[in-house]
Image (tube, grey):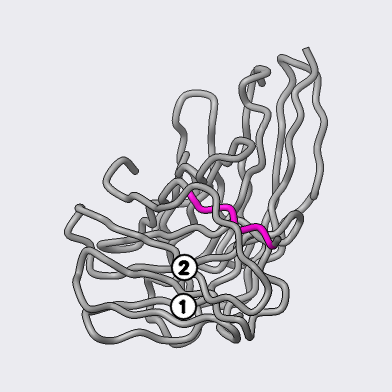
Amino acid sequence: GENVEQHPSTLSVQEGDSAVIKCTYSDSASNYFPWYKQELGKRPQLIIDIRSNVGEKKDQRIAVTLNKTAKHFSLHITETQPEDSAVYFCAANGGSGAGSYQLTFGKGTKLSVIP
Amino acid sequence: DGGITQSPKYLFRKEGQNVTLSCEQNLNHDAMYWYRQDPGQGLRLIYYSQIVNDFQKGDIAEGYSVSREKKESFPLTVTSAQKNPTAFYLCASTSRETQYFGPGTRLLVL
């Protein structure tokens, strides 16, 4: 089945700096890669996703890049703000048995933005 | 996300007791999922269902059971066989790739 590795597990940045979180996946058939943000005690919320037919996608201060050859994708947050502090999860589809809609998640990155 | 509800928000289980977590969605989604979240472990799949009256085990199904009698509902039972049930349980649903999560149930053992 699919295996997703996420790094780093914790990340601290100064307010206004950029943050980058990286993920690798194992299943070359995976073609959908979402990123979720989870605040303490809350549900994960989808913040951006990318499909394998594009290499980069941006939404205001957030961008995701995908390198299919190397099987890795990254989340970039520019001009970080204290409200960006949360746990971020990457995921990839194509897990065993459930068809292409099942997601396999990374273990998460706890981002702290220091004012 | 508002179309997926979970209850209760907190649940306390006594040793040897079975407890059931509720998950309901009004998004007309076909597939539903149950995840367990422990600190530092990310989201681990317990069970999933792609259509009514059919469901499959995920990566950590031991000690859990589910049913899918209606499209809108996918309850999870934590049985007495699950020796370490303390965790945050998340239900999700999807019509295609994008998964939307419910607010979660925190299960604690007395």
Under tag 1, what secondary structure?
strand
- Label 1, residues with CA under 10 Å away: few <14, some 14-19, many ≥20: many
Where's residue B32, x and y in %?
A: 34, 68
Q: Between residues A82 and A76, which one lies in front from this camera angle?
A: A82
Q: Between residues A11 and B104, which one lies in front from this camera angle?
A: B104
Where's residue A76, x and y in %?
A: 63, 36
Q: Between residues A48 and B89, which one lies in front from this camera angle?
A: B89
Asked if the residue under mark 1 is in contact with the one under mark 2, i.e. CB atoms within 8 Å, the reply is yes
Main SS category, magenta section: strand
* Residues at marks 2 and 1, CA–CA distance in whole angstroms: 5 Å
Under tag 2, what secondary structure?
strand
The magenta stretch is: B104-109
Residue under the image location 29 percent in, 58 percent down: B24
Quick check: do tags 2 and 1 share a chain?
yes
Check residue B108 for magenta coloring: yes
Q: Is residue A49 left or right of residue B52?
A: right
Residue under the image location 64 percent in, 74 percent down: A3
Q: Is residue B65 left or right of residue A68?
A: left
Q: Amino acid at mark 2?
A: Trp
Q: Is residue A76 above or below residue A93?
A: above
